Image: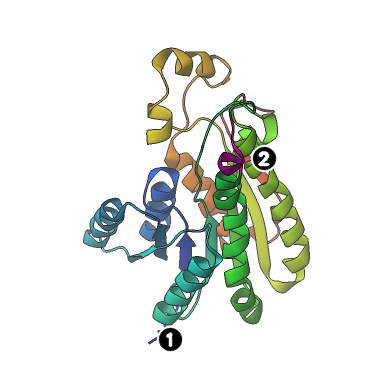
Amino acid sequence: MSDQSNDQRVAIVTGGTRGIGAAITTALARSGVHVAAGYNSNAQAAEELAGKLGAEGASVSVHQGNVGEPGDCTRVVGEVLEARGRVDYLINNAGITVDKTMRRMTVDDWHAVLRINLSGSFYMAKAVLDHMLERGFGRIVNISSTIGQTGGIGQANYAASKSGLFGLTQSLAQEVARKGITVNCVAPGYIETEMVAAVPEEVLAKLLKGVPVGRLGQASEIARAVQFLVDDGAGYITGSVISVNGGLDM
């Protein structure tokens, strides 16, 4: 049964139990928001994060689903609405990489990345939009990447998916701007996550030479940008892309 009397803000964070997503979940939950953190396959990581934050007194629920499947997106949003009665924030963070040069990239490799990184954000936004419009309030934040602005060798599918989020963000922002809903994008640079930790040391050193601040970003720094954009005081910011990349792309 939904808790319609609960005034606590509710956020859905896709891919919200690992890496940047876990940092966003943690920051929002510790600020008093109930976070419905989505995950696809790693139930252990999801339960561990929820348990850790729950022990601190934060409010977190975890929801299994594949954002590349429209039915899963609709189901998860329904679960959250049934349990909490509202969705105030949607953070589209879930993403994958299948890095190969164009000559080696298969059609399946192309579609796999576009389906999760770009279509998944469309499916989730579509699933929450009517509810947000009815309430006259909402914050949607899409997590893109600096690679969507610069491209990257062996990353045609990833770059296209992340670049596509810019157009999705700006188009939806225009459609709902007068309805109390903002839609923005955060574009991280090289962030210290498990994915980056797998990069060979010599390759990472070369990448860091191109970052003016001379270091990797922290997932918590992305989370702070998201917190800023979902705040009530950020209602005049919409259709924007906020780069958090250490000056990598100016």
For disc 2, the neighbor class at 10 Å (few under 14, some 14 to 19, many from 20) is some
171 or 138: which is nearer to us?
171
Tags 1 and 2 touching, CB below 8 Å? no
**Any part of residue 9 in sight:** no
Q: Residue at x 43, y 57 (%)?
A: 28
63 or 244: which is nearer to us?
63
- Residue 226, percent across and down? 53, 51
Q: Residue at x 70, y 54 (%)?
A: 168
Q: Secondary structure at mark 1?
A: loop
Q: Quadrant of residue 194?
A: top left
Colour theme: rainbow
Q: Residue at x 73, y 68 (%)?
A: 176
Q: Is residue 121 above or below residue 210?
A: below
From the image, tell me which residue sits under label 2: 160
Quarter of the image where the C terminus is located = top right
Residue 5: numbered disc: 1
Residue kind at label 2, given as amino acid type: Ala
